[in-house]
Amino acid sequence: MMRRIAALGILGISALSLSACATLGGAAIGGAGGAAVAAATHHNVEKGAAVGGVAGAVVGTVAH
């Protein structure tokens, strides 16, 4: 439960504090989101962050 709260907090802070380019912003937000989902589902947080970061970078690049 604490991991989930911490991960969601990091996601919120990342979303508010990022003003970098869309690719880096998407990667950071995706990484935090991936870590949060992995922690909530009791999976490997590092792998979740890596997958989320890549997905976020792609979305940030395409959406911008």
Image: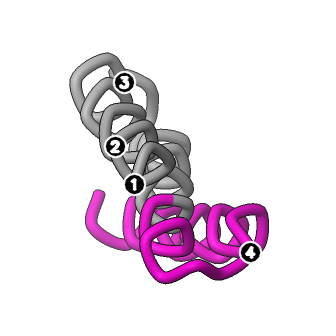
* Residue at mark 4: 44
Q: Amino acid at mark 4?
A: Asn
Q: Nearer the viewer, residue 14 or 8?
A: 8
Q: CA distance from mark 1 to mark 3?
A: 26 Å
Q: CA distance from mark 3 to mark 4?
A: 25 Å
Residue at the (77%, 62%) spot, across then down: 46
Q: Nearer the viewer, residue 58 or 3?
A: 3
* Residue at mark 2: 5
Q: Amino acid at mark 1?
A: Met
Q: Nearer the viewer, mark 2 or mark 3?
A: 2
Q: Reply above or below: 57 against 10.
A: below
Q: Nearer the viewer, residue 17 or 46?
A: 46
Q: CA distance from mark 4 to mark 2?
A: 16 Å
Q: Nearer the viewer, residue 50 or 19?
A: 50
Q: What is the magenta segment's predominant secondary structure?
A: helix
Residue at the (44%, 43%) spot, across then down: 2
Q: CA distance from mark 2 to mark 1?
A: 6 Å
Local SS, label 1: loop
Q: Quadrant of residue 5?
A: top left
* Residue at mark 1: 1
Are the residues flagged by discs 2 and 3 in contact, CB closer than 8 Å?
no
Q: Quadrant of the N terminus?
A: bottom left
Q: Is residue 41 magenta?
A: yes
Residue at the (31%, 24%) spot, across then down: 13
* Location of residue 49 in the rendering, given as x and y in whole percent from the top left corner: 64, 62
Indicate the colouring scheme: one colour
Q: Which residues are magenta?
A: 36-64
Q: Amino acid at mark 3?
A: Leu
Of callouts 1 and 3, which one flags the residue occurring earlier in the amino acid sequence? 1
Q: Quadrant of residue 42?
A: bottom right
Left or right: 23, with 29 as reference point: right
Q: Nearer the viewer, mark 2 or mark 1?
A: 1
